[in-house]
Each structure stands twice: as C-alpha cells, then as structure tokens.
Image (cartoon, rainbow, N blue to C red):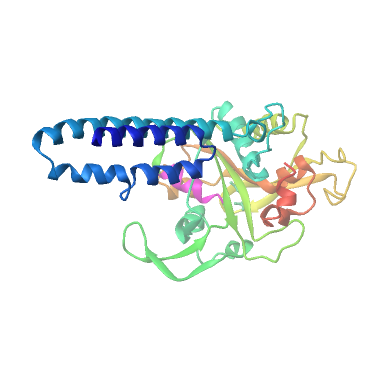
Amino acid sequence: MLEQKIAQIKKEALAEIAAVESLGVVGELRVKYLGRKSEFTGILKSLKDMSEDERKTIGQLANLIKTEIETAFVEKEKELKEKSFDFAAEKIDVTMPAKKLQRGHLHPLSRIQYEIEDIFTSMGFEIADGPEVETEFYNFDALNIPKDHPARDMQDTFWIKNNEQLTADNKQQEKIVMRTQTSDVQIRFMEKHTPPFRIIAPGRVFRRESTDTTHDHTFHQFEALMVGEDITVGNLKFVAEQFFSKFFKADVEIRLRPSYFPFTEPSFEFDINCLVCGGKGCSSCKWAGWLELGGAGIVNQNVFEAVGYPRNKYQGFAWGFGLERLAMMKYKIDDVRLFHSGDLRFVKQF
Ligand code: DAH
C-alpha cells in the first residue's frame, strides 16, 4: 500500500519534472516533492512507527526513489541552464584590438643619468653615491672650504635648522646641509679607497637661489674623479671628449677657461660648443655659441690631505657638470624648471 503510494509519487514527480520549462519552477517542484512538508517526507518520518520488517523494506524503497527523483531534478536543472546560455551574447571577437595599457616610463633625467653611467662604466669608471643631506665637513671643510673662507658664499646653501650631528670622532657638533654639490662624494669615496681609481657620482644637489629658465633650487650634477700617480689636464680633456662624442653622437669641442674652486688647482670653467646652433649663437646657448657645463680642475693637494693621502703622491682630475644642462641640449628643452614641474604633458614627450 505504502509501496504503491511511493511509486505513485515517483511517477507524478518524474512526469512533472520532465515537463518543466523554467529553473524557477524546478525549485518549486523540489519543495513540493522533497520539501519538509511534502508527502514523501511524511512517509520517511512515519518509518519510526512501523514494525521492523516494514521499516526495512519501505525505508530502502523510499531512499532509492528519493535518489531517483533528486537525480531527475539535477539533470533537469543542467539541461535548462544549458538551454538558457546565450551564445551570441557571450561571443568574444578575438580579432578586436586590445585595450591600450598605460605604461609608465623613465623620467628624462633618469634616462640621461643611466646613459651617462653606461658610457662611463664602459670606460672603466665606477659609480659612486653619497647622501643628499650632508654634513658641513663633507660638503665644505674637507673640500678645502674652511668655515671663514669667502668661497663658502659661492654657493647659496640650505642649512638644516636645529639639527647638528656629532663629527666622526664624536668631538664636536657639526652642522647639516642639503648638499650644494656632488663633490662631497669625492671625499666619501677617497676615505675608503686608495688610488688609482676613476669614478663618477651623479646625484641631486640643492641651492638657495631664485629660479629662472636656467636655474632651479634643485638640480643634478655628475661628479667625475680620476686619481693616480700621473693624471694631468690631458686626461681630463681626453675623457671628457670621449664622453661627449658618445653622449651626443657627434664631435664636441671643449673649452677650458681659467677659474677658481677651492678643491682644484688649477681650476677651469668647462664649456662645450653649442650643438643646437653649431656655435653660431642661438637662444639655447644665450647667443654665446658655447654652453657652460660646470667646473673642473686638478685636485688640490689639500683635499688629498683631508682624506689622509700623503701630499704630492697622487694627482687627479675632477669635475662637476650639470645634468640638466646636458638633457636640455640633447632634447632641446628651453626651461630647466620643467624637469621638476610634475607636468605629465612634458614628461610624456620622452
Ligand atoms: N662643485 C662645483 C660646483 O658645484 C663644481 C666643480 C668644480 C666640481 C670643480 C669639481 C671640480 O669636481 O673639480 O660649483
């Protein structure tokens, strides 16, 4: 009797499941046939009141049928899901052009710096580095610029307020500066190395200056220092010429004018011929035909002495050139302030 009832439920359920057309109705049917309040669940609940024999046969049968109905539901769901899948809407046209990715790139100054580093490493130079916040000793004293020397005024300096640090031997408080030149790296490097060596040191420097198209308060220099027992101005000129012809991929003329720096003797102002006008005079070189790149010279023996080298044992040349000046000439940029303007329209051109 109960067996017949179960067979009846199965027949009705399978017929209804077979006829169903929507996923929503499948859910309703599941509640109707297998839900907590369904006839079928009622039968399963009543098993506990049956005799042992009955419980066994009815129980087995009911579970079998339940699995059968459940399987029918699962298959129906699968079938309906596949039917409702909209192939046209899901179609992907693999021939469509892809979305363009926005990629970042190096700032023009970084590019120039890496280019310079490549050229110098190919000539056997090492790259040296130093801190941008520097002590008075490395920025001035060790470079033969004593505290009361008028040469201190050659560079307008940002002093860091109320921030003094003990000197290396812990004997004295020392003032802190935003380094005004990369020449500090000369001292830091020589303290740890013995000649012969050749280095360049590119880096950021700071001056308390008003700005215009060729001056900024923050800019980059790259220092060069080559020390050995018989280095001369000839080496300075040769290395510089090699570098510039590689950097500009053109023959570059060099001009040395007598000048003064405390850390070199003799000292020069270092110019190259203007590559924009070929020396005739234009707005890039301010109608001079020459571009002033920075200072250079033969290292003063006082500097060697400050780092503990014996006097007159070594000779070296050094220079400190402006990186922005080179970039401006290479890319024909007419305002140095653009480099730090944060203007993407400018940066994206490179
Ligand atoms: N440090 C100097 C400046 O910023 C430039 C300079 C001159 C660097 C002569 C040198 C040098 O290494 O030998 O004005």
- Left or right of residue 42, residue 262 in this image: right
Q: Nearer the viewer, residue 338 or 32?
A: 32
Residue that appears at 46% across and 41% down: 26
- Verify whether residue 187 appears in magenta: yes
Residue 262: name its quadrant. Answer: bottom right
Q: Quadrant of the N terminus?
A: top left
Q: Residue furthest right?
A: 280
Above or below: residue 99 compared with residue 249:
below
Viewer can see residue 137: yes
Q: Residue furthest bottom?
A: 162
- Left or right of residue 326, residue 53 in this image: left
Viewer can see residue 228: no
Residue 246: x and y, percent? 70, 29
Q: Residue furthest left?
A: 52
- Left or right of residue 294, residue 73 in this image: left
Residue 173: name its quadrant. Answer: bottom left
Q: Quadrant of the C terminus?
A: top right
Residue 136: x and y, percent? 47, 61
In the image, the segment drawn in magenta is 182-191
Q: Does the magenta stretch mainly form a helix, a strand or a loop?
A: helix
Residue that appears at 82% across and 48% down: 285
Residue 84: x and y, percent? 58, 35
Residue 135: x and y, percent? 45, 59
Residue that appears at 27% across and 44% down: 41
- Verify whether residue 323 appears in magenta: no
